[in-house]
Image (cartoon, rainbow, N blue to C red):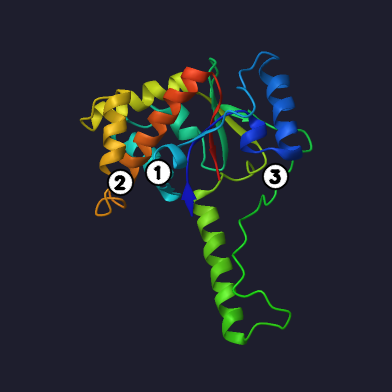
Amino acid sequence: MGLSFKVGHPDDVIGGEFGELAIEALRSNLGAGVPLGVPGELYDTLDALKAGLAWEWWKELQELAEELLGQGQAPHLARIDAWMGLYLDMRTEPGLVWPEGGERQPHESPEAPPIAACSDPPPADEEDVEAMMADMMQAMFEDMGPRSDEADALQVGDVRSLREELRRLAEALGYNASDEAMQALAEYYLDDERIDDDGPVQALTHLWIASSHAVATGAPLWIVK
């Protein structure tokens, strides 16, 4: 279950009816001038850095920040789940914005992929596998998805406050919090022998690089699944 960070206009990240409702809700709650970027200018760390992240690394990054910085010392990082969150280039406290009537689908849990596409009922053993996959996906959603009753909300934070939290976390880990250092560290983990190592650190590097792009362009940084 891969994860990447995107920077861009809501139309390019979530799109459709929910995207339109999200734009309306953000403007209604945060002002008509809320920075939403320019349609058609999408940045995705998966493409830019040639690597995705494991879904669970987001929560592990949050836990690492709490361990090293202290409870409540990284509220913008801690408050956003890897489901439907975004960081705006404007001063705001972490909070929720509810798109009116906007129920994101699927909003309960991702569906397990089909074992086989056929018109006949699958054999009993394949039914068992499908049930096992569905249970596994539900467990992943409950463990790593949005907190209770927030699956249909936008979780909103401030990208510049997030960067300050990331800077303090990087320095606590002994890293230089600069674009050049974070880029070099991200590239270090592209080696096949290191691609699965130090998940929270990889998430930190990708998030820092994406946040730099968000500040440079004024577009939202999205943490969506």
Q: Is residue 211 left or right of residue 150?
A: left
Q: Earlier in the sequence, mark 1 or mark 2?
A: 1
Q: Is residue 141 left or right of residue 208?
A: right
Q: Are marks 1 and 2 in contact (CB under 8 Å)?
A: yes
Q: Is residue 80 above or below residue 197?
A: above
Between 91 and 195, the residue placed more toward the observer is 195
Residue type at mark 2: give it. Leu
User: In the image, which disc is placed on residue 104?
Assistant: 3
Please name the residue that numbered disc 2 is placed on. 190
Q: Earlier in the sequence, mark 2 or mark 3?
A: 3
Between 65 and 39, the residue placed more toward the observer is 39
What residue appears at the point 39 percent right and 36 percent down from the top-left corner?
206
Q: Is residue 27 above or below residue 210?
A: above
How far apart marks 1 and 3 lie (CA) works out to 28 Å
Q: Is residue 34 above or below residue 103?
A: above
Looking at the image, the residue that sits furthest to the right is 101
Q: Single out the mark in the foreground, 2 or 3.
A: 2
Residue type at mark 3: give it. Arg
What residue appears at the point 40 percent right and 23 percent down from the top-left corner?
163
* Residue 200 in which image quadrant: top left
Q: Are marks 1 and 3 in contact (CB under 8 Å)?
A: no
User: In the image, which disc is placed on residue 50?
Assistant: 1
